[in-house]
Image: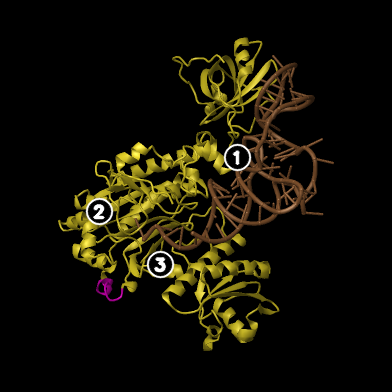
Chain colours: A yellow, B brown
RNA sequence: GGGGACGUAGUUCAGCUGGUUAGAACGCAUGCCUGUCACGCAUGAGGCCGCGGGUUCGAGUCCCGUCGUCCCCGCCA
């Protein structure tokens, strides 16, 4: 097929911007053919670019050459159109598209490129499976919805740079080729050619570098930066993801919160949402108890309550030594035995020792617990949860009042809370509910490795008042760490750091990092702390998650141009892939097959 | 690492209790058509039923394995 050259023609307009006011203007448009409607001597082309679609008319009588070419055109051909914007005749308007009052009467048609039939239609509403979309991501990205998502992401980044810059933060790049650190996620490794047997690691976050900026006197730093973690994926987790990384010297937690709240307010305004400041604050302990989650969705009620029945009545029942109760208003008629049995299965897997429910009716209380607890026992539960007729009350229990059991119980309760909220459609659209979760525990006991691990990361400062319990009772030490939660999604987390080397060393010791090991891994950093580290702290915000929420997408893959699948592969370029043996030899590597 | 769902035409799907030539819609190709906009009408092409093995006279359908996609748990400081 003979193709035309663009030459020195410039686009005068974008397709989606033409309106009645442009009538009579000579224009030159270029884009992709979304559709061709061939009526014989009259051919309509829907011409599309990222701004939208406009109808082009090609008439065999008035422009025979253009018409000849239009007969050859197919979907997704790239064409240029020279013509005049004309008002559509009465009765031929198309109110469904923004440009529907006008059309472009083509005088010249340029065939700039042909295109194979795409594997799926380039339409906003796609029913195409995700793997097909990912294999042809460049076509998927041509769809209006993906254009909108990726452009929204760009706006969010622009807004962030403006906001942070306005508060005196400067963007500084940090290395991608760095060293592996103990603790935390599995590292992606990069073998060194010039030092065989040695490896770089891709950063899980620029944590240490940003702290070094504070020591270096760069007061306020931020960076929109890629991070890498070699862990299993989820709808909201990719092996490489983007953070707004922030650190400031001489911080108060409140000052940092204000800066970030202001940023979130601006980001939400990109989708015309107004948010009220300041955000709610909630301690970790209360979040776990009431919502069973450290990222509670506060768009709806449903709060769990610890339940103690007089006389230890409940704790006499197997699996209810510790009990939480949840009242679901008006749900009595909507729960079924079989439905609850299904919940029970998962709850058991998550570590809840027992679960039950009761429904309150005008005629009385119904529950399989009636025999075990008696009427007065059930009454006591109803009284404690303030349940009314028509309400459902769910009970969840653990066997022993141990930290581990209660945590499993909390986790199960959090899962069930979300299940019930979904089932009873308690989450009203249009709500944007933020919360800061504060006072996280400093350490988490890892029962497999029989040691404490940093819950946030090993550079987080303990609360000053807990310092003397660091060695004697690590579990009770709270950290100056915080998470930012939006609609049940963790969208950020950070902490005030340790700036004193003596405390940092003590924390390393609690984590089971010997002085030698700590020196080996973090020597440069511990050294740096000794040269006048200012008090400092910061936060990292998840760009992918935030933009996904703004875009109303349930997977972050929808806001990442080239995401990976759940097994961390790229279906388009087929990474990861094998490499030439010579490449391995250069690196001093040998593949051991299992 | 564990659990669940799915895999049939280019795409989205149907295909019953195993039984003759595997269907539909959209898309695609060819022809006709001057006011369509999901154009219409006519004709037509298009299938390794993910892959491998097994059971059976016979497998898209049953069994085992494997690969891939998605979701959840573990994991993700």
Q: Residue A535 in the image: x percent, y percent?
A: 22, 59
The reply to whether callout 1 and callout 3 are in contact (CB within 8 Å) is no
Tell me the magenta residue range.
Answer: A465-473
Query: How much space separates mark 3 and mark 2, taking CA atoms?
Result: 25 Å
Is residue A397 one of those drawn in magenta?
A: no
Which residue is rendered at x = 19% and y = 62% of the image?
A501
- Residue matched to label 3: A284
**Residue A211 bears which disc, if any?**
2
Q: Residue B22 in the image: x percent, y percent?
A: 75, 39
Label 3, secondary structure: give it.
helix
Seen in the picture, residue A554 relative to A182 is either above or below; the reply is above
User: Disc 3 sits on a residue from what chain?
Assistant: A
B45 lies left or right of A251: right
Dot 3, crowdedness within 10 Å: few (<14), some or many (≥20)?
Answer: many
Dot 2, crowdedness within 10 Å: few (<14), some or many (≥20)?
Answer: many
Q: Residue A362 in the image: x percent, y percent?
A: 69, 77
Marks counted in the figure total: 3
- Residue matched to label 1: A126
Please name which of the two marks, 1 or 3, marks the residue nearer to the observer. Answer: 1
Q: Nearer the viewer, residue A290 or A269?
A: A290
Label 2, secondary structure: give it.
helix
**Is the same chain shared between marks 1 and 3?**
yes
Decide if residue A480 is in sight here.
yes
Query: How much space separates mark 2 and mark 1, taking CA atoms?
Result: 45 Å
User: Disc 2 sits on a residue from what chain?
Assistant: A
């Amino acid at each position: 097929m003979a193709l035309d050259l663009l030459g020195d023609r410039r686009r005068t307009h974008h397709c989606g911007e033409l309106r009645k006011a442009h009538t009579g203007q000579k224009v030159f448009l270029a884009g992709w053919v979304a559709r061709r409607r061939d009526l014989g001597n009259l051919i309509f082309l829907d011409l599309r670019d990222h701004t939208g679609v406009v109808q082009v008319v090609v008439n065999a009588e008035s422009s025979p050459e253009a018409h000849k070419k239009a007969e050859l055109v197919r979907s997704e051909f790239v064409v240029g159109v020279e013509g005049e914007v004309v008002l559509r005749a009465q009765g031929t308007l198309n109110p469904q598209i923004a440009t529907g009052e006008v059309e472009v009467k083509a005088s010249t048609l340029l065939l700039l490129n042909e295109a194979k039939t795409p594997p799926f239609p380039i339409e906003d509403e796609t029913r195409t499976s995700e793997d097909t979309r990912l294999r042809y991501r460049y076509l998927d990205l041509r769809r209006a919805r993906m254009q909108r998502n990726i452009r929204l992401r760009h706006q969010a980044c622009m807004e962030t740079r403006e906001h942070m810059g306005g508060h005196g933060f400067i963007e500084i790049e940090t290395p991608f080729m760095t060293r592996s650190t103990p603790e935390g996620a599995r590292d992606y490794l990069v073998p060194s050619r010039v030092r065989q047997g040695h490896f770089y690691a891709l950063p899980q976050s620029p944590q240490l570098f940003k702290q070094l900026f504070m020591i270096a006197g760069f007061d306020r730093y931020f960076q929109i930066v890629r991070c890498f973690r070699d862990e299993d994926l989820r709808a909201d987790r990719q092996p490489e993801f983007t953070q707004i990384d922030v650190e400031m010297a001489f911080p108060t937690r409140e000052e940092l919160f204000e800066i970030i709240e202001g940023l979130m307010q601006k980001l939400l305004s990109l989708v015309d949402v107004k948010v009220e400041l300041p955000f709610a604050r909630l301690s970790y302990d209360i979040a776990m108890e009431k919502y069973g989650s450290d990222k509670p969705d506060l768009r709806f009620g449903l709060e769990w309550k610890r339940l103690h029945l007089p006389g230890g009545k409940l704790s006499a029942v197997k699996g209810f030594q510790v009990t939480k109760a949840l009242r679901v208003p008006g749900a009595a008629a909507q729960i079924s035995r079989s439905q609850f049995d299904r919940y029970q299965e998962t709850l058991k897997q998550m570590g809840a020792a027992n679960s039950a429910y009761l429904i309150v009716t005008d005629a009385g209380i119904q529950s399989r617990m009636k025999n075990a607890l008696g009427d007065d026992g059930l009454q006591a539960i109803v009284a404690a949860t303030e349940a009314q007729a028509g309400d459902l009350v769910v009970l969840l229990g653990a066997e022993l009042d141990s930290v581990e059991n209660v945590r499993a119980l909390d986790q199960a309760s959090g899962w069930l809370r979300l299940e019930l909220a979904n089932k009873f459609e308690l989450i009203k659209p249009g709500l944007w509910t933020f919360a800061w979760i504060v006072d996280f525990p400093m350490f988490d006991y890892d029962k497999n490795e029989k040691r404490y691990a940093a819950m946030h990361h090993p550079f987080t400062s303990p609360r000053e008042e807990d310092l003397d319990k660091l060695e004697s009772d690590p579990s009770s030490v709270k950290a100056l760490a915080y998470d930012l939660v939006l609609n049940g999604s963790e969208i950020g987390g950070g902490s005030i750091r340790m700036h004193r080397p003596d405390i940092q060393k003590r924390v390393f010791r609690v984590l089971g990092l010997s002085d030698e090991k700590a020196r080996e891994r973090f020597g440069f950093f511990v050294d740096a702390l000794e040269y006048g580290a200012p008090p400092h702290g910061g936060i990292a915000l998840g760009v992918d998650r935030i933009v996904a929420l703004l875009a109303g997408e349930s997977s972050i893959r929808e806001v990442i141009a080239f995401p990976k699948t759940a097994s961390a592969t790229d279906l388009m370029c087929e990474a990861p892939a094998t490499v030439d043996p010579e490449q391995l030899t250069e690196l001093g590597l040998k593949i051991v097959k299992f």
